[in-house]
Image: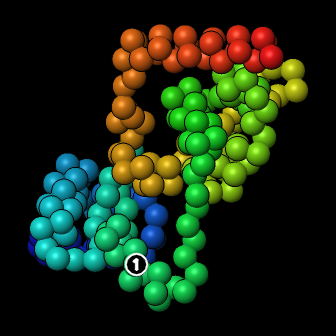
Amino acid sequence: MTLSELEAKIEAILFTLGEAVELERIAAATEQDEDTCRRVIKSMMDRYLEDNRGIQIIELDGAFQMCSKAEMYETLVKIAHVPKKHVLTDILLETLSIIAYKQPITKLEIENIRGVKSDHAVNKLVEYNLVCEIGRLDAPGRPILFGTTEEFLRNFGIESLKDLPIVNSEKIEDFKLEAEKEAQLKLDI
């Protein structure tokens, strides 16, 4: 099989499936080894970025997906007529960051960290497909465990959870002091 034939097969797989496809599956479908497929996909990714193209290939936690480039959004909105734009409020972002950093996590654990009920925020994040149920805790009531989705990775432009920014210990201490002050103010009122 020639390089161009392999590229065509990979392109067809990614275009047709429209979702992230694991390297192992691509290799099996093209009857090539994973290293060869990874090398070819990385080369394709570079060419899509260099050329003035409307699509790109992105890597999401060891899988690859073909998607439109962010700068094509306005053009796509014009053709779709109804853009699906989710607004992430401060509350949603706070809840999402807790889930991203602490996953798997239950709603009760989220509420203990935030100090308020989080039903609405978690439900909205599930509706936006940024968070999903990833299992159940082996405890009374078997509470749902939540984690982030591929859509979360895609929306925030990161390949895997390892790429989340690391919060330094000084900042964590600042956050704790701030939270304690807020809690004390609420008690004083």
Please give the name of the residue rendered at 88% of the width and 26% of the height, measured from the top-left corner. Answer: 141
State which quarter of the image contains the C terminus.
Answer: top right
Who is closer to the viewer here, 54 or 186?
Answer: 186
The three-letter code of the residue at mark 1 reads Glu
Picture quadrant of residue 145: top right
- Residue 86 horizontal/vertical position (percent): 58, 61
- Above or below, comparing residue 18 to residue 38 in the picture: below
User: Does dot 1 land on a helix, a strand or a loop?
Assistant: helix
Please give the name of the residue rendered at 20% of the width and 49% of the height, measured from the top-left corner. Answer: 35
Please give the name of the residue rendered at 70% of the width and 43% of the height, measured from the top-left corner. Answer: 122
Q: In the visual, does 140 lie left or right of 101? A: right
Who is closer to the viewer here, 77 or 19?
Answer: 77
Q: Can residue 150 be seen in this snapshot?
A: no
Identify the residue position indicated by label 1 in the image: 74
State which quarter of the image contains the N terminus.
Answer: bottom left
Who is closer to the viewer here, 85 or 39?
Answer: 85
Q: Can residue 182 be seen in this snapshot?
A: yes
- Above or below, comparing residue 159 to residue 10 in the picture: above
- Above or below, comparing residue 106 to residue 70 in the picture: above
Please give the name of the residue rendered at 22% of the width and 77% of the height, measured from the top-left corner. Answer: 53
Disc tally is 1
- Residue 92 horizontal/vertical position (percent): 62, 44
- Residue 68 horizontal/vertical position (percent): 35, 72
